[in-house]
Amino acid sequence: MSSLSGSDSAFGSNFMTRELYLGGPAITFTVGTEARGHKHFHVPLSILAEYSMFFYDLHYHCNLMEVEGLKFDLMDIDPQIFNRFTIWLYYQGIYVDEGIAQPLDYYEQVEQLWTLADKYRVPQLQRQAENVAISLLKSLQEQYDFDVVGYWHCIYHNSYVGSPQRRFIAGQCAFLVRSCREKCLDPEMIHPALRGDIVDIVRNLYPQFS
């Protein structure tokens, strides 16, 4: 695997050492379908709580007995993607398969990671995924004259309101706004629903820009 991003500091306070992450109760995740082969992951609650606001709340509002009995079934997630999610928790770097040749395949992996981060409220990973996704699309645009906005609109027209796919696209647009690169977004070319989602993402992930 290769890393597409480095680490930066956001929600995690890094008040615990790596050794302490291995102690304490662990959350059990059953990932994937039985037909395609599911896997069990046991992730220390301490490291989940360090970066996930969902598990941070769980950590401080549940007792030890309640936590040890918790199990999460993620039938719609690829076990390989969840494994990369756990790697990110320890190293804060996005890793993908080196054998993938097509940028859009990389993009799909990054989207799935973003979806997990969205589900469990991991803003640092969301922002990293948005940054990496923009870099991949920029490379496609420069090398193959890829129509990025057209691609986004295609996904918008083939996904439901509030879907992770739509929020992921809006997150990338919000990243462009945050990094002062919004000039490449022509408001007249942006789907009205996407414009509304961009505003919501900016307010939630980048409150300083509200």
Image (spheres, rainbow, N blue to C red):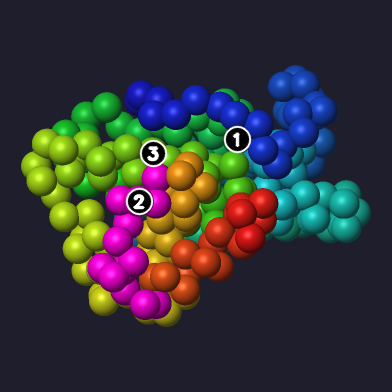
Q: Residue type at mark 1?
A: Leu
In this rendering, is residue 35 above or below 101? below
x and y, in percent, of residue 162 in the image: 47, 75
Image side of residue 31 versus residue 205, left or right: left
Residue under label 1, please give it.
89
Q: 10 Å neighbourhood of mark 3: few (<14), some, or many (≥20)? A: many
Residue under label 2, please give it.
183
The residue mark sitting in front, 3 or 2, is: 2
**Discs 2, 1 touching: Cβ within 8 Å:** no
Q: Residue type at mark 2?
A: Lys
Q: Residue type at mark 3?
A: Val
Is residue 177 among what the camera can see? yes
Q: Which of the two labelled residues, at mark 1 and mark 3, occupies the earlier sequence position?
A: 1
Secondary element at tag 3: helix
- Residue 55 is inside the magenta segment: no
Compare residues 30 and 54 and report the one nearer the observer.
54
Compare residues 66 and 56 and report the one nearer the observer.
56
x and y, in percent, of residue 52 in the image: 68, 48
Which residue is farthest left?
144
Query: What residue is shown at x 76% (from left), y 28% (from top)?
Result: 14
Q: Quadrant of residue 50?
A: top right
Label 3 – label 2 distance at C-alpha:
19 Å
Q: Main secondary structure of the magenta part?
A: helix
In this rendering, is residue 2 above or below 142? above
